[in-house]
Amino acid sequence: MNIEKIIASLEAKHPGELEYHQAVKEVLISIEEIYNQHPEFENASLIERLVEPDRIFTFKIPWADDNGKVHVNIGYRVQFNNAIGPYKGGLRFHASVNLSILKFLGFEQTFKNALTTLPMGGSKGGSDFSPRGKSDAEIMRFCQAFMLELWRHVGPNMDVPAGDIGVGGREIGYLFGMYKKLTREFTGTFTGKGLEYGGSLIRPEATGFGGLYFVKQMLETKNLSLEGKTIAVSGFGNVAWGAITKATEMGGKVVTISGPDGYVYDPDGISGEKIDYLLELRSSGNDIVSPYAEKYPSATFIANHRPWEVKVDIALPCATQNELKGEDAALLISNNVICVGEISNMGCTPEAIDAFIEHKILFAPGKAVNAGGVATSGLEMSQNAMHLSWGAKEVDERLHNIMHGIHAQCVEYGTEKDGYINYVKGANIAGFMKVAHAMMAQGVV
Ligand code: 2IT
């Protein structure tokens, strides 16, 4: 495999799609050695086929705001790979959304979904629509307009969307409602649905909970536990909320959250009613975190800074891609960080990841540590297909088993000669080999 050549060809075909090139490069570096041991892969041009999405839909979304003014956004669905199951992945509504971001997310999703052991291919979609400051009625009209185009391309055995940044239970409800009306069928085409209409218990918490089950396993490889550890979390959305809830329950102390405006440092720990307040803050729709520090006197708001400058044992990026950079990693390392888990997708830059690995710090990539969200989506699909619903204990036990299984795969494929577990390598190889074997078995399609 000639990595430079493949990346150069992607850059020529898709200029400027930096996040997409970044995600592909990370995987290629990890799998190069094992790929070269399989000449049949090279003969089948497996890599060239794997790095391009199967297809992409883009569409115009005109919608009217509460004053009757019409706006136009762009909608996308990137169906990346369905070698191991129907396309599956979230929708992101955020002003920054573009094809590069959705292609990187769809590519990552393909391997992440493979790691869960559930039969799900990879896809991603969304829009450059920003829910910030929009009324409920505006959100509903936008979701309906989005669905007027997307409904033809999704289905329970075709492509199953869910939430991501800017898309939560409310949006899934509006999207599903319109889908149901257009198809005149009640099927499990979305996950993250409300409990009353086919949703799964634990799904809202699953990304954060699964992340902490994984972090616990990582610490146990060094005979450590979460008890008494200080933790920096970024973001204050659904994922951060789930992670903080579980980290606190496991005896850790979360001392930061962040938003686009800066971060909040609360040395007393974010626990109890402060965690519930996060939900209130998020649903205010303002997308700023500073009100937390106005409400709780123990906290300080630091404008325009990232939380990685605080001395902590564990760092958990829970906001967005490339939010933890090389200089942040250097700060964390100089503060003796023990463990970093990328609960956001591609939360760390390549420079940051290289620094953590070079310093033999426990580092988990997103496709392993944040797979609990989509895994529980897979469990929602199973329940929908069987027309029944499991109790919280059953879902949580399955989530536990899946996260343990992912950890075991990382250990199997990522343990280096000196005993250091390279989770990036382990997750990439395990995810890739599964998808590769499925593609080989199905011929040139
Ligand atoms: O990045 C992710 O794994 C998600 N946003 C969840 C996707 C899903 O289909 O539940």
Image: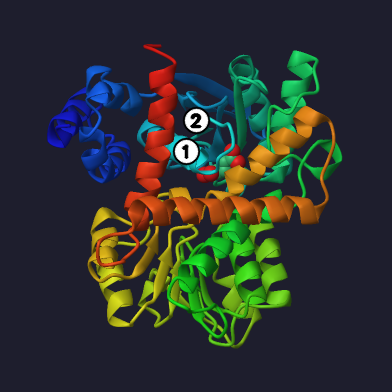
The three-letter amino acid code for the residue at tag 1 is: Gln
Q: In this rendering, is residue 354 above or below 65?
A: below
The answer to whether residue 164 is left or right of residue 13 is right
Q: Splitting the image into four quadrants, where does ligand 1 fall?
A: top right
Q: Find disc 2 in the rendering and name its residue.
A: 123
Determine if residue 344 is in view. no
Quadrant in the rendering for residue 47: top left
Q: Earlier in the sequence, mark 1 or mark 2?
A: 1
Q: Quadrant of the C terminus?
A: top left
Q: In this rendering, is residue 152 above or below 22?
A: above
Query: What residue lies at 56% left-to-right and 26% top-to-bottom?
Result: 85
Q: Answer yes or no: do the residues labelled 1 and 2 have beta carbons within 8 Å?
A: yes
The answer to whether residue 266 is left or right of residue 5 is right
Determine if residue 422 is in view. yes
- Along the line of sight, the residue nearer the viewer: 155 or 118: 118
Q: Find disc 1 in the rendering and name its residue.
A: 109
- Secondary structure of the residue carrying numbered label 2: strand
- Secondary structure of the residue carrying numbered label 1: helix
The picture places residue 59, in percent across and down from the top left corner, at 50, 19
User: Crowding at label 2, few (<14), some or many (≥20) Cα neighbours within 10 Å?
Assistant: many
Query: What residue lies at 77% left-to-right and 32% top-to-bottom?
Result: 384
Question: What mark, if any, has residue 278 been given in the picture?
Answer: none
Q: In this rendering, is residue 419 above or below 433?
A: below
The answer to whether residue 185 is left or right of residue 146 is right
The verdict on label 1 being within 8 Å of ligand 1 is yes
User: Crowding at label 1, few (<14), some or many (≥20) Cα neighbours within 10 Å?
Assistant: many
The answer to whether residue 104 is left or right of residue 11 is right
The picture places residue 444, in percent across and down from the top left corner, at 36, 11
Q: In this rendering, is residue 211 above or below 129?
A: below
